[in-house]
Image: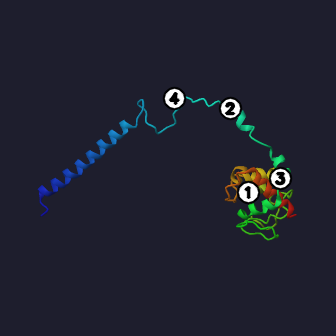
Amino acid sequence: MFDTMTMTKVAGAVCGSLLVFMLGGWAAESLYTVGGESHDGEHAQAYVIETGATEEAAAEEGPTFEEIYASADAAAGEKVFAKCKACHKVDGVDGTGPHLNGVVDRPKASIAGFGYSEVLVGMSADAWSPENLNAFLISPKGYAPGTKMAFAGLPKAEDRANVIAYLASTQ
C-alpha cells in the first residue's frame, strides 16, 4: 500500500501545492504594489482635495465651556450621571471609584483610603475646578495618562457641563 511510488506521488503533490501558493502570493503582491513599493509603510497622499474649510473655522465652532457651564442644568446632569453610577456614588461611600459628592473644587486624590493612580496622586496639589473636571471628562486617559478610570469620556460639552453642575449641587 505505501510503496515508493505512492510516497513519490505524495511528495510531488505537496511540492506542487506549495508552488501554487508561492505563485499566488507573487501574483497578489504584483497586483497590490504601486510604483515598485508595497503598502506596508506610510505614503504621502498623491493629491489634496480642497474643501474650502480651514482649521481655524473648525476651532471656532461654538460657545466656550464657561458659557455652557453658566447655563448648565443640574437635573439634566443627574440623568447623565446615570452613566457614572456603576463606579461612583454621591452619598459619601466609595465604590469602584471614589465618591463624588463635594468633588467640585475639592483637591485631587484627596479621599483618604482610596487607591488613586500615581498620575492623580501627582496632581494632588491642584483642585477639581469645573474646568479641570471638564478636561478630565472629555477623555480621562488623555487628561491623566495611566488613570485607573476605564470610562471613555463624555463627548458632548452640554452633558459635561450638566454633570458638573449636578456634582456641584451635591456639596
> Which mark is drawn over residue 118?
1
Residues marked 4 and 3 touching at CB (< 8 Å): no
Point out the tag, 3 or 1, that comes first from the N-terminus: 1
Residues marked 3 and 1 touching at CB (< 8 Å): no
Local secondary structure at mark 2: loop
N-term-proximal mark, 1 vs 4: 4
In which quadrant will I find the C terminus? Answer: bottom right
Tell me the number on the disc at residue 130. Answer: 3
Query: Measuring 52% from the left and 36% from the top, which residue is drawn there?
Result: 42
x and y, in percent, of residue 83 in the image: 71, 62
Q: Amino acid at mark 4?
A: Ala
Residue 46, disc: 4
Nearest to the observer: residue 171 or residue 124 = 171
> CA–CA distance between discs 3 and 2?
30 Å
SS under mark 1 = helix
**Residues under labels 3 and 1: Cα distance?**
22 Å
Locate the N terminus and report the quarter of the image it occupies. Answer: bottom left
Residue at 70% in and 37% down: 58
Contact flag, marks 1 and 4 (Cβ < 8 Å): no
Secondary element under disc 3, as helix, strand or loop, is helix
Color theme of the render: rainbow
- Residue drawn at point x = 79 percent, y = 66 percent: 99
Marker disc for residue 158: none
Q: CA distance from mark 4 to mark 3?
A: 45 Å
Please state which of the two labelled residues, at mark 1 or mark 4, is closer to the viewer: 4
Query: Disc 2 residue type?
Result: Thr
- Badge 4 crowding class, 10 Å Cα cut-off, few under 14, some 14 to 19, many 20 or more, is few
| Quarter residue 111 falls in | bottom right
